[in-house]
Image (cartoon, rainbow, N blue to C red):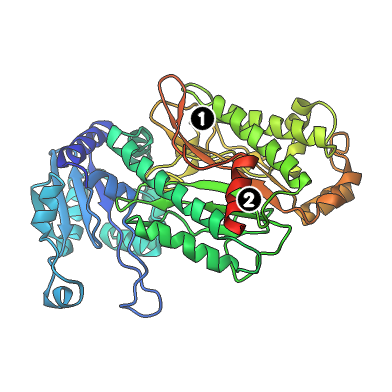
């Protein structure tokens, strides 16, 4: 945990922004894998963690804005809990670490909420993203399960997004730890990959670095020689010579702050000539986009800048033609770049995405596009100092998509369809780094992980020597 003063200050800011009513923050519960006592690794709800620091299952917090009171609800450990799981601090001890002096048994939470509702106090709660959260809210609010979503508090969502978006100094330091561990696991992936091994074998080595760093993965590892599939997780596929490995992976610290990096490297000791050309197109787009990251800049504009650089590179390669800006305006680049450029990062690897992309990445005036490509842009609004964002351009050669477009001759004024067959088995390339938006520009957080062709090939040559 951070110091209790940090959590007290965060809750005071939240009370000020919400203004009135009761704020209900629900922590996560244990979730069973195959029978009741065989649990998935516990992961606390990030907003509950942000405002309380308490990383223990089956807790809830009430912040009564009108009466300026705060209560932690939970249950004390029994003898069976101690036998199986060891000693844990008392509920009061945990609450005091969070700067909260009042605790109550969890079974009193329902009556507390009912009494508040009877006093006509508004009950502010967040959208549930786990079924057990929805069931609990249905019980606590005495409302049908189908009515839970309708009562979600937009005021609370917007208040939390405004607070969690701007990272404090202590958060930035924790994110830097997560990024440093993420760099180490990527170096392990680069050094240990070789033809004949399975994706799963390398992914296991990658995850071991995250665990030994004190936390775990910030999301399931993407490790594949089919990089054209945007989120292709590892399997028992053999790494073949001549292909590239796309490794998208990150660690989170013991305090659950995340890192998220991607590198693409050859299974062999060096890229082929064509792989090198395409890689440098993506790298140029990354460097150009990263240089544009600064306060006040619309991330959507940075996304389109990266798309333009990718298009210029593909035009020089002979896959595309015409004016690059016109091609991007028409959406021709989405044959090869179908996703968004990046996202917010913090306590969640896609920070606060459970609260709704419209609130996190957009504004009331800026609505999310429904166009192919742009509809996958998670972050579009103007950047502010204190944001932590990823920048991750890529080129993805998806045979099925190329066939569909070729059959229609879609946007043929910008695409040389006769050149596509050479790329049917190419795969995909993505390069991703993490940035802190500063008052004057940005700071690269992933400073130690190689990303140029010579640097990557040097690692691969040494690994295979």
The answer to whether mark 1 and mark 2 are in CB contact below 8 A is: no
* Percent coordinates x, y for residue 149 in the rendering: 41, 53
Q: Quadrant of the C terminus?
A: bottom right
Instruction: State left or right for residue 338 relative to residue 149.
Output: right
Q: Nearer the viewer, mark 1 or mark 2?
A: 2
* Percent coordinates x, y for residue 62 in the rendering: 20, 49
Q: Which mark is residue 364?
A: none
Residue positioned most to the top? 440
Answer yes or no: is residue 81 visible. yes
Q: Quadrant of residue 108?
A: bottom left
Instruction: State left or right for residue 95 relative to residue 230.
Output: left
**Could you tell me which secondary element the residue under label 2 belongs to?**
strand
Depth check, front residue: 403 or 256:
256
Q: Which mark is residue 265?
A: 2
Q: Quadrant of residue 212?
A: bottom left
Q: Residue at x 60, y 31 (%)?
A: 287
Q: Residue at x 54, y 63 (%)?
A: 202
Residue positioned most to the bottom? 35
Q: Residue at x 37, y 69 (%)?
A: 40
Depth check, front residue: 182 or 140:
182
Depth check, front residue: 16 or 287:
287
Q: Quadrant of residue 463?
A: bottom right
**Could you tell me which secondary element the residue under label 1 belongs to?**
loop
**Along the polypeptide, which appears first: circle 1 or circle 2?**
2
Instruction: State left or right for residue 437 relative to residue 108.
Output: right
* Percent coordinates x, y for residue 379 in the rendering: 52, 36
Residue position for label 1: 381
């Amino acid at each position: 945990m951070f110091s209790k003063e940090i959590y007290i200050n965060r809750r005071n800011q939240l009370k000020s922004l919400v203004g009135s009513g009761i704020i209900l923050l629900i922590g996560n519960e244990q979730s069973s894998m195959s029978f009741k006592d065989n649990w998935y690794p516990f992961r606390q709800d990030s907003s509950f963690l942000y405002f309380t620091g308490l990383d223990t299952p089956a807790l809830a917090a009430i912040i009564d804005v009108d009466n300026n009171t705060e209560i932690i609800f939970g249950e004390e450990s029994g003898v069976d809990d101690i036998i199986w799981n060891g000693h844990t601090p008392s509920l009061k001890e945990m609450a005091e670490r969070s700067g909260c002096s009042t605790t109550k048994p969890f079974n009193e939470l329902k009556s507390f909420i009912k009494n508040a509702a009877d006093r006509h106090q508004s009950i502010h709660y967040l959208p549930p993203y786990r079924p057990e959260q929805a069931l609990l809210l249905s019980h606590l609010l005495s409302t049908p399960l189908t009515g839970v979503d309708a009562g979600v508090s937009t005021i609370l969502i917007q208040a939390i997004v405004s607070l969690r978006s701007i990272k404090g100094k202590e958060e930035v330091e924790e994110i830097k730890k997560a990024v440093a561990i993420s760099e180490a696991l990527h170096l392990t992936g680069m050094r240990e990959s070789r033809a004949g091994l399975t994706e799963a074998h390398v992914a296991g080595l990658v995850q071991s670095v995250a665990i030994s760093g004190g936390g775990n993965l910030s999301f399931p590892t993407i490790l594949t020689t089919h990089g054209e599939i945007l989120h292709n997780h590892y399997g028992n596929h053999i790494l073949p010579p001549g292909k590239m490995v796309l490794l998208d992976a990150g660690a989170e610290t013991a305090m659950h702050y995340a890192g998220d990096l991607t590198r693409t490297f050859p299974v062999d000791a060096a890229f082929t000539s064509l792989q090198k050309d395409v890689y440098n197109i993506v790298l140029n787009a990354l460097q150009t986009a990263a240089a544009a990251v600064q306060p006040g800049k619309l991330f959507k504009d940075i996304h389109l800048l990266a798309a333009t650089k990718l298009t210029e590179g593909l035009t020089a390669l002979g896959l595309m033609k015409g004016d690059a800006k016109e091609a991007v305006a028409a959406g021709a680049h989405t044959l090869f770049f179908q996703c968004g450029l990046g996202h917010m990062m913090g306590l969640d690897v896609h920070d606060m995405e459970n609260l709704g992309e419209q609130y996190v990445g957009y504004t009331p005036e800026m609505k999310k596009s429904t166009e192919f490509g742009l509809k996958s842009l998670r972050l579009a609004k103007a950047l502010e100092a204190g944001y932590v964002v990823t920048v991750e351009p890529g080129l993805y050669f998806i045979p099925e998509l190329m066939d569909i477009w070729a059959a229609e001759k879609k946007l043929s004024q910008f695409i040389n369809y006769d050149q596509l067959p050479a790329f049917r088995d190419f795969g995909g390339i993505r390069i991703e780094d993490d940035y802190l938006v500063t008052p004057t520009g940005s700071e690269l957080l992933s400073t130690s992980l190689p990303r140029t062709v010579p640097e990557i090939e040097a690692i691969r040559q040494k690994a295979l020597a």
